[in-house]
Amino acid sequence: MEKEAMEGHVNVMLPQENLRSDLPNGGIVLGHDKEISTLQEEISALRSRQRHLNRRRREALGKLIDLKGSIRVFCRVRPSISTSNIKIKSPVTVEQENIAVRAVGIKKDSSVDRVFDQESTQDDVFHEVKPILRSALDGHNVCILAFGQTGTGKTYTMEGTSDNLGAVPRAIQELFSHAAQDTSSTYSFSISMLEVYMGSLRDLLAPRQQPLFRSIEGNTTCNLSILATTSGSVQVEGLTDVAVPDLKKANQWYCRGRRSRSTSGTNVNNVSSRSHWWVGLDRVSACAVCSGNLNSTQFYLVLALSVCSLTRITIRRCGGVTEQVSKLWLVDLGGSERLLKTGASGLTMDEGKAINLSLSALGDVIAALRRKRSHVPYRNSKLTQILSDSLGDGSKVVMVVHISPSKDDVGETICSLGFAKRARLIESSRELSEVR
Ligand code: ADP
Ligand code: MG
């Protein structure tokens, strides 16, 4: 059933060959007009049948995804990046949907909707994400969120590398490829990209990019405001939204947005590697000077930890007379590590708090939604305000929780799995209350 629901696309074969062979060298034949009109009727009947079948496919897919849970939680374990030849046993072991963490004094078992082990590929992850994209094309708002400690592979899963594309470029590809195949509807797409940092929003596709330090300083030009419309949808006022007519243009804009990120070209996980380190220091020295007494090393680290990167694809689908607009959000959340471990203090401590606040606000929102609370605390953070029309009823959410296989990160791993469990428990308690 799942396969049918995903692929329930009907190909209409037009009997054009017959039409042509009946025409004697393009001459006018008596009765030909009648034949054309019969064929046109057949075409329109087939089109209407195709629309009907597509509608049924959409309903089936919607039900299927609802059965699986409108919030699906996956867990991906990053491969070990040990430089030594000695193989150290990881405290994390996985099996199908279960994750076991074993260390001195620690015994924790968790389950999620799907585990991706250390050998998992970008293909494996995208295979699970793909059905949700069809939901976005069918008119639902969709969020795909990468959660986890810094260095566990959030950006790898979302962006990937040039050899191993991540979920965002694959999703863009999939949207265009589906649009080209679906003859019963016409689609148009537009893209926006932004960063949330310390409660400020920064437009990554704005015509003239703000220098890095201006956004850090809280310059108002990059502090866009969020508006809720009467229809319940959310708009980020002034956010650049670029129409992308084809895949090539979409990729160009996506790459441009990536280059504009505060953390582009940096990798906090490799911070001990000298080359990255110096790139980082070069880029932040101006900011550190601007902000007075900041230690540039600390500053760089916290910047890389604290920024949430969001890509929004707006999908307009026109089938027959109706037009449906939906949003696909692809979100690389800031690092979820605890403050103690980063050793942050002063201003950096505030930044650490800001990102923890966004993430805990996200957890609270998911909790309130699943418990069907009348008040959902969207307003508690910029992140949850922006996503407020894409997390609630009718929306589909995939959260990929990333964990490290390393012994040193066990504490963080337990925290991340706790976050995953919270989101899933909420889903199962909803199912229980519905059964009753
Ligand atoms: P995060 O965004 O969570 O801070 P990154 O995505 O930057 O983490 O990943 C840290 C490092 O680990 C990067 O060098 C990345 O290429 C590598 N990495 C992460 N996950 C994988 C994976 N599944 N396979 C191969 N390399 C990975
Ligand atoms: Mg990252």
Image (spheres, rainbow, N blue to C red):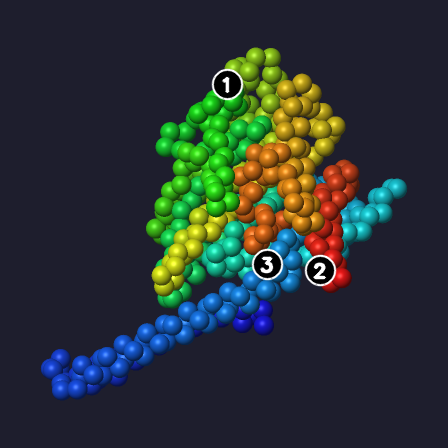
How many numbered badges does the structure rendering display? Answer: 3
Upstream in sequence: badge 1 or badge 2? 1
Residue at the image point whose x is 11% and y is 82% from the top: 27
Upstream in sequence: badge 1 or badge 3? 3
Cα separation, mark 1 vs mark 2, equals 56 Å
Query: Dot 2 corresponds to which residue?
Result: 434
Q: In the rendering, at what x and y percent does residue 223 appear?
A: 48, 27
Q: Quadrant of residue 186?
A: bottom left
- Tag 3: amino acid: Glu
Q: In the rendering, at what x and y percent does residue 233 appear?
A: 49, 44
Name the secondary structure under disc 1: helix
Left or right, residue 364 beside residue 13: right
Query: Dot 3 corresponds to which residue?
Result: 128
Left or right, residue 402 beside residue 235: right
Residue 35 visible from this viewpoint: yes
Upstream in sequence: badge 3 or badge 2? 3
Q: In the rendering, at what x and y percent does residue 146 appear?
A: 61, 45
Residue at the image point whose x is 29% and y is 78% from the top: 41
Name the secondary structure under disc 2: helix
- List the single residue furthest toward the right: 105
Left or right, residue 126 beside residue 423: left
Cα separation, mark 1 vs mark 3, equals 42 Å
* Mark 1 CB lies closer than 8 A to ligand 2: no
Where 107 falls versus 284 (above or below)?
Answer: below
- Tag 2: amino acid: Glu
Where 403 falls versus 354 (above or below)?
Answer: below
Query: Dot 1 corresponds to which residue?
Result: 286
Q: Quadrant of the N terminus?
A: bottom right
